[in-house]
């Protein structure tokens, strides 16, 4: 093991010794290398009496360097593989440097790298140091001017941040482009692109009547798949004006699309770079979910322009300042465009299965972490998704008006600067004259708090009392004792006819109870019969709520709750209870009989025509194995899978007629649209098809083949193909072969084909996966392909990944070690798939741990992978 990076602590934050006044960069792009010339004006930070300056720099070949025109011999510099130390510096000086870099050799996809035939950059979090020597930290903000020079034939498109100022021809078939970004920004928001890219364009007129030029650049072969993304961009720009009063601030907005990207997309000022997965979408190549994700990610990156770019992070510990807030904003955008209920349920489903798992794992960390070795390991569900829940709680506590007042004050105070999560909290508090001191614990205490609720009804007094208690999470690992948090609990009470009770003098039928103490009670008077409580409506806080409701109570809520989220959740609780009961019975060699009430409740939801069909589809979707495992100990995955299958069989036995009829009712031949109504209808129909095919009945295989053949849209085709392949129904291999022949030149489409096969729940799937990885369409260098095969197998095929002989774990470890030499960021993401080892049966857990140990002991591990496995072993 070689670990070259040390642990960095939030408490050690120091402002920089020098600020940067401006940056002027010039890129001379050649095929095999790029020459980067930098002119940077530094000015000493008067608050600090230190005239040394450390400039980050990695994988740079320094050609020359001068200070105020005086050349410094490279041999005289304090130069290491992490950067350059300058000392005895004047108060203000101009640094000039020239470095050579080799983008085609950069497989880590950080800094300047090659994708296909073009070059592009990724600088967040610390990629800029692979481009030039610079104080590569988010609190150093400067305006940038960038000139790019390149061969005109090979690289006709030259882009950078801001507005294009000039362009023209040069000798030797070269040309140049000069870009100016007037908004001071940290280096992580820098971007540049050079290549032969096609584009589509459009305009947007802002609320203050400015015309913005919008362009999406992509390789020619994808140019017909960008229209939906363009429309999404315009929707996002309008929405941010209307809901947040935020208007775009440059003359142009450019997006570049690449197949080679470590994450989803990047919000570089005025020049977003997108993973092709979140831009390219056409009716015959994208599912409804793909379209919705495109709109959400386009929105997310656009919203960063104000929450992230105009106001950025003081240091990387504050990452959730921009990410939590921007995820909250993109969630609201999707909720306003699509179905709010469905969006909330999907987000919480993801949070409770994946973020709760992270928060119970060795990687558990607060929303604002206290330390890290490799910051790229902290682009986590906790920082993003739990961070968004924290922002949502301000919204729940303050209401839309109060929240917007807080946002206004935040921009008024901090526009153009780099700030902390505390600054955001203070703006929210001050704008609303509210004390949010205790609320700050959401940023500092890790783990998922547990809230228990007990109720008491006093018929004589007509009084109903709810007693709440909050408990520290098992995984809490702060240095000080855990403190009770400020937890908003939105709730309602229903009488036995399903009508909500009036809860206060204002006759509100729901209230937000603020749980701030360890134990706290709420009393409601004039309650004429024992009500059924609906607690934590809309999932008003990211906690594990434990309440003693009966099977009948859950069924009642599944039928009556007016809060769509809690209605879905009640249905889930019923399903979860049954699956767990079957799991225990299987372990004890007993049989479990599902109560009739369950099927009645299921039928009511399935056939309820008044409900949003998207909600019905979710309510009849059984919990995933992953979401069950988070709430269990010593899990035997194979038995859990069998328990779930038993329930599916019983549902089919009792309700197949109804399921088939709902399928047919929702199988229309309307022309395809990505409208909320049609998306909901397809999701319900395809969930019904899932049940039908699970029965193994040939008639339904036929139905599935019919849908596959006749569909006019990709959602219906790929669903049918997936169902047939996962059941290994007759003919599925031919369908897969046809698919490959049709789409082998299209990486996104092939990735779906790879994922379908990696998630077949069959004994020989690991062999299949190994074969798939030999195909020319697969490469460990491509993160999307790695996620499509490895990610899908390990996270989406739990029975095979957790095969009792441990072959799944050994396979993952082999791949992680191979990947680590290519792309440490992706290797670290993949090794994290072993992080939940504590949840499993000792036979599985020990094998998972032995693979973690094997990786830990390997030579030359990246800091990225080292940090994950080292934490797991602590
Ligand atoms: N800020 C981006 C996510 C992102 C983070 C790191 C990256 O490279 C290591 C790339 C993108 C977002 O939130 O969309
Ligand atoms: Zn983001």
Image (cartoon, rainbow, N blue to C red):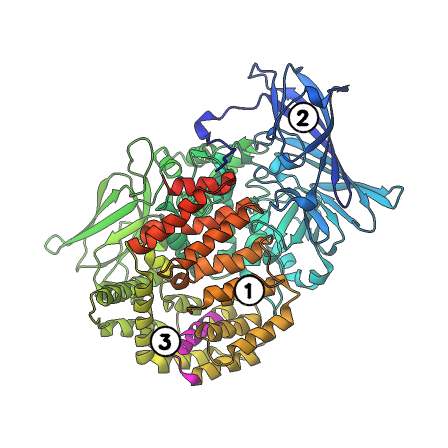
**Residue 780 on the magenta segment:** no
Estimate the spatial distance between the alpha carbons at disc 3 and disc 2, rounded to whole Å.
65 Å
Label 3 vs 2, first from the N-terminus = 2
* Label 1 sits on residue: 772
Nearer to us of marks 1 and 3 is 1
* Label 3 sits on residue: 607
Most common SS among magenta residues: helix
Label 1 vs 3, first from the N-terminus = 3
The quadrant of the image that shows the C terminus is top left
Give the image location of residue 27, x and y in percent: 75, 38
Nearer to us of marks 3 and 2 is 2
* Label 2 sits on residue: 21
The residue at 48%/33% (across/down) is 420
The residue at 57%/49% (across/down) is 262
Is any part of residue 184 visible from this angle? yes
Q: Tell me the tag on residue 367.
A: none
Q: SS of the residue at dot 1?
A: helix
Q: Are marks 1 and 2 in contact (CB under 8 Å)?
A: no
Task: Write the start and end of the magenta stretch as one range.
Answer: 682-698
**Which of 821 and 508 lies nearest the eye of the viewer?**
821
Estimate the spatial distance between the alpha carbons at disc 1 and disc 2, rounded to whole Å.
52 Å
Q: Is residue 186 left or right of residue 447?
A: right
Give the image location of residue 306, x and y in percent: 57, 41
Q: SS of the residue at dot 3?
A: helix
Res 428 quadrant in image = top left
Label 1 vs 2, first from the N-terminus = 2
How crowded pointer 1 is (Cα within 10 Å; few <14, some 14-19, many 20+) is rated as some
The residue at 63%/69% (across/down) is 743
Q: Is residue 723 left or right of residue 516?
A: right
């Amino acid at each position: 093991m070689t670990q070259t990076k040390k642990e960095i602590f939030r408490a050690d934050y120091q402002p920089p010794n020098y600020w940067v006044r401006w940056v002027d960069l010039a890129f001379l792009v050649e095929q095999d290398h790029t020459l980067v010339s930098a002119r940077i004006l530094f000015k000493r930070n008067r608050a600090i009496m230190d005239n040394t300056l450390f400039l980050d720099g990695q994988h740079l070949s320094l050609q020359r360097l001068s200070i105020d025109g005086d050349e410094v011999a490279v041999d005289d510099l304090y130069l290491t593989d992490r950067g350059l130390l300058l000392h005895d510096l004047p108060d203000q000086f101009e640094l000039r440097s020239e470095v050579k870099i080799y983008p085609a050799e950069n497989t880590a996809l950080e800094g300047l790298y090659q994708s296909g035939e073009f070059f592009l950059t990724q600088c967040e979090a610390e990629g800029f140091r692979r481009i030039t020597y610079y104080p590569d930290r988010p609190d150093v903000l400067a305006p940038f001017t960038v000139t790019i020079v390149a061969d005109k034939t090979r690289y006709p498109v030259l882009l950078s941040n801001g507005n294009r100022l000039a362009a023209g021809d040069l000798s030797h078939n070269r040309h140049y482009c000069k870009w100016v970004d007037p908004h001071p920004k940290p280096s992580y928001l820098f971007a540049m692109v050079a290549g032969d890219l096609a584009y589509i364009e459009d305009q947007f007129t802002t609320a203050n009547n400015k015309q913005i030029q919008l362009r999406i650049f992509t390789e020619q072969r994808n140019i017909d798949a960008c229209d939906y993304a363009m429309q999404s961009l315009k929707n996002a720009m309008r929405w941010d004006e209307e809901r947040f009063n935020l208007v775009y601030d440059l003359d142009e907005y450019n997006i570049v699309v690449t197949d080679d990207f470590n994450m989803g997309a990047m919000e570089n000022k005025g020049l977003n770079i997108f993973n092709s997965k979140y831009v390219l979408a056409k009716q015959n190549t994208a599912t409804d979910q793909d379209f919705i994700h495109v709109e959400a990610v386009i929105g997310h990156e656009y919203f960063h322009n104000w929450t992230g770019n105009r106001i950025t992070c003081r240091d990387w510990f504050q990452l959730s300042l921009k990410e939590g807030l921007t995820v909250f904003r993109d969630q609201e955008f999707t909720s306003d465009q699509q179905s709010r209920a469905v969006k909330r349920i999907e987000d919480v489903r993801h949070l409770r299965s994946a973020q709760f798992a992270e928060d119970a794992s060795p990687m558990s960390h607060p929303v604002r972490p206290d330390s890290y070795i490799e910051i790229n390991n902290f682009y986590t569900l906790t920082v993003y998704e739990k961070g968004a829940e924290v922002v949502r709680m301000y919204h729940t506590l303050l209401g839309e008006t109060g929240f917007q007042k807080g946002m206004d004050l935040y921009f008024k105070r901090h526009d153009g600067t780099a700030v902390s999560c505390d600054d955001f909290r203070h703006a929210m508090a001050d704008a609303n004259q509210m004390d949010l001191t205790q609320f700050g614990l959401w940023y500092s205490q890790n783990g998922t708090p547990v809230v228990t609720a007990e109720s008491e009804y006093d018929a004589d007094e007509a009084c109903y009392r709810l007693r709440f208690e909050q408990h520290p999470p098992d995984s809490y690992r702060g240095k000080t004792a855990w403190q009770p948090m400020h937890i908003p609990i939105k709730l309602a009470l229903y009488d036995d006819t399903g009508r909500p009770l009036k809860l206060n003098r204002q006759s509100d039928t729901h209230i937000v109870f603020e749980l701030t103490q360890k134990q706290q009670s709420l009393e409601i008077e004039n309650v004429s019969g024992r009500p059924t409580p609906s607690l934590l409506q809309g999932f008003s806080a990211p906690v594990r709520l434990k309440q003693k409701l009966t099977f009948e109570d859950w069924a009642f809520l599944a039928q009556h709750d007016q809060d769509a989220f809690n209605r879905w959740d009640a249905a889930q609780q019923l399903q979860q209870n049954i699956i767990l009961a079957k799991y225990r019975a299987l372990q004890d060699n007993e049989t479990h009989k599902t109560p009739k009430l369950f099927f009645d409740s299921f039928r009511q939801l399935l056939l309820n025509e008044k409900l949003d069909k998207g909600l019905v589809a979710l309510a009849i979707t059984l919990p995933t194995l992953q979401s069950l495992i988070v709430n269990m100990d010593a899990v035997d995955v194979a038995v859990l899978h069998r328990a779930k299958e038993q329930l599916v069989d019983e549902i089919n036995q009792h309700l197949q007629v109804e399921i088939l009829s709902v399928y047919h009712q929702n199988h229309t031949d309307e022309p395809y649209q990505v409208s909320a109504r049609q998306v909901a209808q397809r999701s319900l129909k395809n969930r019904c098809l899932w049940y039908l095919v699970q029965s193994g009945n040939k008639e339904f295989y036929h139905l599935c083949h019919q849908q596959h053949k006749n569909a006019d849209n990709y959602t219906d085709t790929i669903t049918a193909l997936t169902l047939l392949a996962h059941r290994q129904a007759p003919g599925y291999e031919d369908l897969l072969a046809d698919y490959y022949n049709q789409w082998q030149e299209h990486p996104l489409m092939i990735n779906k084909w790879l994922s379908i096969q990696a998630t077949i729940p069959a004994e020989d799937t690991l062999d299949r996966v190994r074969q798939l990885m030999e195909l020319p369409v697969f490469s460990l260098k491509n993160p999307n392909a790695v996620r499509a095969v490895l990610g899908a197998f390990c996270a989406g095929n739990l029975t095979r990944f957790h095969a009792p002989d441990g072959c799944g774990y050994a396979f993952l470890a082999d791949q992680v070690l191979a990947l680590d030499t290519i792309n440490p960021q992706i290797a670290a993401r993949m090794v994290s798939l072993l992080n939940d080892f504590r949840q499993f049966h000792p036979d599985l857990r020990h094998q998972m741990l032995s693979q973690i140990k094997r990786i830990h002991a390997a030579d030359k591990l990246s800091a990225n992978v080292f940090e994950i496995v080292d934490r797991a072993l602590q």
